[in-house]
Amino acid sequence: MEARFYLEIVTPERTFFSGEVEMVIFKAPDGEIGVLGNHTPMVAAVSPGPVRIKKDGEWLEAALTEGYVEVTREKTIILTDTAEWPEEIDVNRARAAKERAEERLHSQLSRIEYMRSQAALARALTRIKVSQRTKWR
């Protein structure tokens, strides 16, 4: 049996998830990070992308935006701007945001505007991807 640990995902609006899990996988600036029970303590940035949570042998998936994670041996806390389950995502709104971001990226932008447009595109693509499936395999 896999070692369990407490996972909490918190946004400014709500506690999105809290409970004992076997594993969590999320996107970081340098790639994906997987956390199991008794993980080495760390603090890291969280990038927009899917979060996969293994709870009671089943995988759950949601969309996360930018944030930070703190991992201790007993618990993992992800602080993120937004977190959404697939059924909470407005796909039409996400597609419109994707189109707006792509249009902005094709125009003359300052460096900051370009980075903001890239971040908006990453968030929209994550939301679209997660909305298209309810379980990760």
Image (cartoon, rainbow, N blue to C red):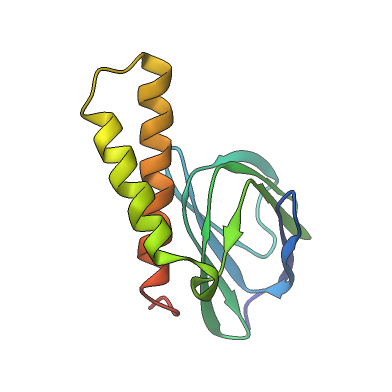
Front one among 28 and 93: 93
The C terminus, quarter of image: bottom left
Please provide percent x and percent y for residue 87.
51, 76
Q: Looking at the picture, does residue 9 appear above or below residue 48?
A: below
Q: Is residue 93 left or right of residue 41?
A: left
What residue sits 38% from the left and 48% below the top? 97
Residue 18 appears in the figure = yes
Please provide percent x and percent y for residue 19.
75, 73
What residue sits 33% from the left and 48% below the top? 98
Please provide percent x and percent y for residue 121.
36, 43
Q: Looking at the picture, does residue 51 appear above or below residue 20?
A: above
Residue 30 appears in the figure = no
What residue sits 56% from the left and 85% below the top? 57
Number of numbered discs present? 0
Q: Looking at the picture, does residue 39 appear above or below residue 70?
A: below
Front one among 133 and 136: 133
The N terminus, quarter of image: bottom right
What residue sits 67% from the left and 42% below the top? 42
Q: Is residue 127 left or right of residue 38?
A: left
Among the 4 quarters of the image, the one containing residue 119: top left
Front one among 9 and 110: 110
Q: Residue farthest to the top?
A: 110
Q: Looking at the picture, does residue 27 appear above or below residue 135?
A: above
Front one among 42 and 77: 77
Please provide percent x and percent y for residue 46.
55, 44
